[in-house]
Image (spheres, helix red, strand yellow):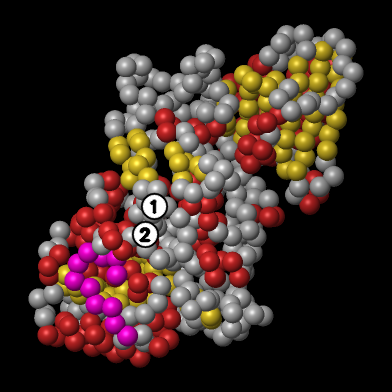
Amino acid sequence: MPAESGSVLLVGVGGQGVVLSSAVAADAARRSGFDVKQSEVHGMSQRGGVVSSHLRYGPLVHSPLIGAGEADAVVALEWNEGVRAIPALRPGGTLIVSLDRIPPPSAFVDRHGGAVAYPAVAPDTLRRTVPDVRAADATSVAAAAGNARAMNSVLLGILSPLLPFPAEAWDGAIAANVPRAALEANRAAFAAGRALRFPAAPAPGTGRPRRRAPAEPPSVGSVDIVDAWCKGEDCAICVRACPEYVLGFEPDARPVRAVRPDACTACMLCEILCPDFAITVRRAAVPAGPSLVAAETT
Amino acid sequence: MTAKALAAATGIDYREHLRLPMMPHILCPGCGHGIVLKALLRAIRSLDLDWDRLAFVAGIGCSSRLVGYIDGCTLHTTHGRALTFATGLKLARPDLTVVVITGDGDGLAIGGNHLIHAARRDVDLACLLLNNETYGMTGGQVAPTTVPGSVSTTTPRGATEPPFDACALVTAAGASFVARGATSLPLELDTLIAAAIAHRGFSFVEIESDCPEYFGRYNRLGRAPEMLQQQRRRFDEVDETLAAKRFVGAPPHAGVPRLRTGVLHERKT
């Protein structure tokens, strides 16, 4: 995060406190002597819709809007919104995301209902797209600190070390913006979030962080495909089931291809779920990577 | 989902048990029946059965086509009468392990009578009923298991009749082993099928499968990946850490009762 200016995108779902968090962060920037502009979209909030807030600070800010690929950090109060906001991050930006999941109305799926499902993206999968993911079970952390609703302050706490605002600016901003009855809970939640520790992001270019020596084989599985048996894009079970996005289609659709063969972890899902006997997974040794989820406060 | 089941899934070459000249099979893209056939082959492997003493009997329908691809002793019979032929086979050759593959139309409509009497007699058969809620092979007509409200070619405004609960039916009729599995829980399926084959007496496994081509398309349920995901939601599969969160609750399930998977009834004989 540059010390003199920065852009933070806050996203979430109506009622979670996106706008309040954004106001607190903007006030903290102002108290730290920065020019700051903030703009939010909250039209759908009362119906459980999405809320997003753009926040930019610096010596002089002309526009509050953050373009695609320009945000230094995205703070997502809801998991799906965080995944959705990844394109806003600049390369090397930080994704701070809560593990809270609020299914959007279109994902209230039953046998006769909606047609989309809540995206099943695991935190460790995000690491491939965003090196620095800081995922936390913010609601549980906030509940432990006194009030589950202060989860937005937990995420601000995680954000705070990345921004050049002194602690007293944050505290003053929280005191000035949070309703008095919830103030102590939010202060405690902010402190708890600030105390969370995350695994260090890998240095640029190193790809997936490793615990073991680089002599280990980089890929633990490989996928064999019987082209003549694959029924192609109309099936696509394997493509959607693969948690590592290994499989995909070329523009001519059939058959399926291993488009990211090195990412295969030999979990076998594609082979077990392929109804056409077209996929065979070969397994090698299994290295383990560090988890991105902060387990405890320190 | 046991480590044992996963180990069984990793060590098998399915091609050893398929009639390769018949492949690829005729089932539509995304049809769940192929997932069941894989689970069946894994289950047989886990039981270490002699393929020469194993017979597969099927009637008519998409699910019944599966026996045509198994490189073993198979019998493709008349519509609804798979259990009848299987009963005769078992009486003539009691040394055989007989597996019946049937569908919801084959087993519950035209063959419904044979199903309840096979269950009543507690014949030593393993019957797998692949339930995709529709008649896929003939173009998506309403089936005895079609959930009310579902669109089919014969119920363009939605089915109105209550569906069969096949597991409750055969339990009441006298089957000594009744279980339910689903293609979205494929490794659990291995253990259920293996237990059904090992059980002495009439063992019945209803397997929720998906027909994306007819049932899914008519009811706008998406293609196979979406249908598999939705199938999971029928089985209360919200994991505990998510369920404990205050914002996450499984949305109420409109009209369709939640289904239990696993062994529903077992009586040692």
Question: Residue A17 got which mark?
Answer: none
Which amino acid type is shown beneath numbered disc 2?
Pro
State yes or no: residue B248 in magenta. Answer: no
In the image, residue B183 above or below residue A172: below
Q: Chain of mark 1?
A: A
State the residue lying farthest toward the right: A62
Instruction: Give the labeled residue for mark 2.
Output: B24
Q: Residues within 10 Å of mark 2 (few under 14, many from 20)?
A: some
Which residue position is annotated with label 1? A228
**Do discs 2 and 1 belong to a common subunit?**
no
Measured as percent of width and height from the top left, residue B101 is found at 31, 74
Secondary structure of the residue carrying numbered label 2: loop
Q: Is residue A124 above or below residue B217?
A: above
Q: Secondary structure at mark 1?
A: loop
Can residue A24 be seen by looking at this rendering? no
Magenta highlight on residue B77 = yes
Residue at 80% across / 28% down in the picture? A54
Specify the segment rendered in magenta.
Answer: B68-78
Residue appearing at x 58%, y 57% in the figure: B250
User: Marks 1 and 2: in contact by CB < 8 Å?
Assistant: yes
Mark-to-mark CA distance, 2 and 1: 7 Å
